[in-house]
Amino acid sequence: MTEAAAAAPATAAEALPKTYDPVGTEARWQQAWETSGAFHPDPSAPGEPFSVVIPPPNVTGSLHMGHAFNTALIDTIVRFQRLRGKNVLCLPGTDHASIAVQTILEKQLKADGKRKEDLGREAFLEKAWEWKAQSGGTIVGQLRRLGYSVDWQRERFTLDAGCSEAVIEAFNRLHEQGLIYRGEYLVNWCPASGSAVSDLEVEMKEVDGHLWHFRYPLTAGGGFLEVATTRPETLLGDTAVAVNPKDPRYAALVGQTLTLPLVGREIPIVADDHVDAEFGTGCVKVTPAHDPNDFAIGQRHALPLITVMAKDGSMNEAAGRFQGLDRFEARKAVVAAMEEEGFLVKVEDYRHSVPFSDRGKVPVEPLLSTQWFVKTEPLAARCREALENADPRFVPERWSKVYRDWLTDIRDWCISRQLWWGHRIPAWFVVSETGGAITDTTPYVVARNAAEARQKAEAQFSGGTHAHPVVLEQDPDALDTWFSSGLWPFSTLGWPNAEAADLQRWYPTSVLVTGFDIIFFWVARMTMMAGAFTGQMPFQDVYIHGLVRDENNRKMSKSAGNGIDPLLLIDRYGADALRFALVREVAGAGQDIRLDYDRKSDTSATVEASRNFANKLWNVTRFALMNLDGETPASLGEPDPAALQLADRWILSRLARVNRETAERYGNYGLGEAAKGLYEFAWNEVCDWYVELIKRRLQVPVELEGAAREAALADQRTARQVLAKALNELLVMLQPLMPHLTEELWHGLTGASEETFLALQPWPQLDEAALNDELESSFADLIEAIRVVRNLRAVAGLKPSQSVPVRFVTGRSALAGVLSAATADITALTRAERVEVLDPAAAEANPATKALAGVSGELQVLLPIEGLVDLEALRARLEKDIAKADKEIKGLAGRLANPNFADKAPPEVVAECKANLAEAEAQAELARKRLADLG
RNA sequence: GCCCGGUUAGCUCAGCGGUAGAGCGCCUGCCUUACAAGCAGGAUGUCGCUGGUUCGAACCCGGCACCGGGCACCA
């Protein structure tokens, strides 16, 4: 889209077309905000600080609905806080996504028949940066299209100079504290990316496989044990068979040995509690180098570790004749060989879980490997402690349990990745100590740069027994992407420089807004890192939102191909409509939201409804501009309280109430409720009632003269004042949700200059004095009375042009008062010929038989129009009224008849019940009487 | 196996002790000069099942069923 449809902003009614076209308007304001630095805060500016760092999307990414949702929520929050006068920083950025980027680049190389090794590290990284410069901006441009009020001048990248410095500093400090170590452990090896991955990057998947049963012969004697396995190829690395120590079947055999088929190795039978005697034969083959549980058994029994697989997933030299086979071919070959040699007992179909690599989408291989680890328990302990004091506070609260559970029993974090794109590990191996090569035992120094490394190494490894001059080589590996993401809330603010102005001003941040899917990956890593480096939790609140699901309630995912493209919807309906639709769907407890979508036409009824709302706001503003005679809310000023009419006082009371409710909801993450509340207020109250009610007052008839004219003009001014005020404040309150549209309309309404922004205005002051419960309640009665009249007209099939008399009969003087005061309004809104309000006695004296009649509460509505009346329809209507009243009577009377109710229920409930019963009885009686009158 | 959500109108969801609501969709009538992307009116529910607490339960408690999700995992 973005062809600069930069139409001039609307300042007068004639400039506003009948429908709102978001595309040009949105682009124009996005540019205006950015070029004017509207969202570039000064740390020394006044106001309470409020800060959010956005979850950095991957540079590889393009905007998906999850980003749009997250953005809509964050932006609503920060825009609200800005209106509240806070000194708001919302900081954007992207994540370098090491595995993802490297995978893309390697694929490109492969297409040219090359491998990264052919290029060498330096050239490869050069290419990577090139790629980032070209493609990394995609998502950033797309985020702009949402109208994100972030400070683009502070945009960061997890691999930029500042973040890199932070990473090196963090690694060094953790190492100094003994919280980073290097060692050989069983790690999750992803053969596809050729790297270790963390436990979190492994996903268990149910797979249909087989369970192979094998015989392992006893070394001494002719017996054998039967074991079962889902992974036959690993038997080449077996170093024991384990049985449960309490299993009587095998008690005598513990300590004896078996001869491993195909290999001929003698392996012991050990007793270990891990083995479940009930499962299978109760015998488990133990392959310590290829299975985490077996690794643990191996540790307990001091078993040797035999690795039979290479890092690329093929069998190595320890696999003997199977060397060189891929792990899946090796499986078949081993089974075939076992069968041939008579060791295969049977094969069963078996469904079980297999660990898959999140990124590589292939089964991960538990493999012994020397890697860097973060010792997480001390870091986690600090977080658990803080959580006792709700630090951070989770919204909804239930996620804090998920977070805490994960931090309890946490495993160490493997942080090294055999990748090039990323932060290179700041450790230098003293290769001169191990013959020039890096081995598992090569000593190393951790330092902030090469010079410091050399200094440290020379202090340790030169002179004395050290014959060779020190030669250093930096660890070729990179760090897990999440290591740098873990520093994000403070590295972006200037850490490790503790004096950085941004850090001082905006750290800790106010709230983190993210999906539950990265609580472990990201949230917990940030809190652990922040605890270690800043001594504080990095955010006060964590607002966890749900996922956006597709029209069939499925998770949107790239692989399923069911994503809904937010950009398509933005083009069609506008960013404001999409944002509003997403936020409006949010229910209180952070549930997933479902987005309605029609794939044939690329339309969404939900977003369309929001677009219609935008159009409604556009048109009500258009109406105001046509009727304010060039005046603005400021030039009109506040209305004189003494001059206010009923409708004015009503809408001002509603306005004040909505102001209070909305501020509370925005402030408490009740964003969906805020959106729904504003929608209803704007549409159902301002547009449907207030505007309709003041239309007459806005038109002063030309024929009026003298004092009458003066009065009409004064009243017109009052209506204009109230309309302008209500609309103005409504636009401010809606701004966090629909920033572009409201900005446009507000400029039109106020005539504010192009350099002034609604986004930077103060939240409207709450007018407590305007709140009036009683008034709102009687106004609701008035609305109801009008509805009854309209309904009667519809039932009777009256044409809109037919004007008929309206008679209200009620014994309630308050209601009679409101109706009498509003007869002019009622006349206009119901096309009444005349309106009379009578008490029952007066009505009795002057009966109107053969009239359309309806009853609502203590109000009887009569349309005395004999002749015009469709008697059948009228009867039906009355019978319906009677049935409804009877049903109510039955329920209420039943309740009152129960002696326990009167005894135990609170008196006000009983009184209310009695009043309702009396009312229902009166209603039924009235309706019956009318019915009888019809004859 | 453990933990967490959910089950209310055709659809999406509010309501969380006083007898059920909204939006969309649907039906009827209207181009009433802000808006047909609109206006007015209307229909629609044994609130998953089952016990219990209570004067009173969609709401609180117990059990069950089904649908999601997370964690752990037995070869």
Image: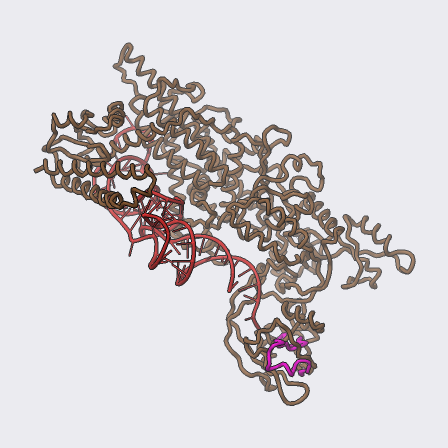
Chain colours: A brown, B red
Residue A785 image offset from top left, x and y in percent: 24, 32
Q: Which residues are magenta?
A: A233-258
Tell me where residue A40 sits by quadrant.
top right
Residue A697 image offset from top left, x and y in percent: 31, 21
**A380 in relation to A802, above or below:** below
Residue A406 image offset from top left, x and y in percent: 59, 55
Tell me where residue A776 sits by quadrant.
top left
**B59 in relation to A258, above or below:** above
Q: Is residue A253 magenta?
A: yes
Q: Is residue A245 magenta?
A: yes
Q: Residue furthest left?
A: A935
Q: Is residue A773 left or right of residue A214?
A: left
- Viewer-nearest residue: A789 or A385: A385
Q: Is residue A795 visible?
A: yes
- Give the residue drawn at x 52%, y 68%: A207
- Give the residue drawn at x 55%, y 83%: A345
Q: Residue furthest bottom?
A: A222
Q: Is residue A147 visible?
A: no
Residue A589 image offset from top left, x and y in percent: 46, 47
Q: Residue furthest right?
A: A464
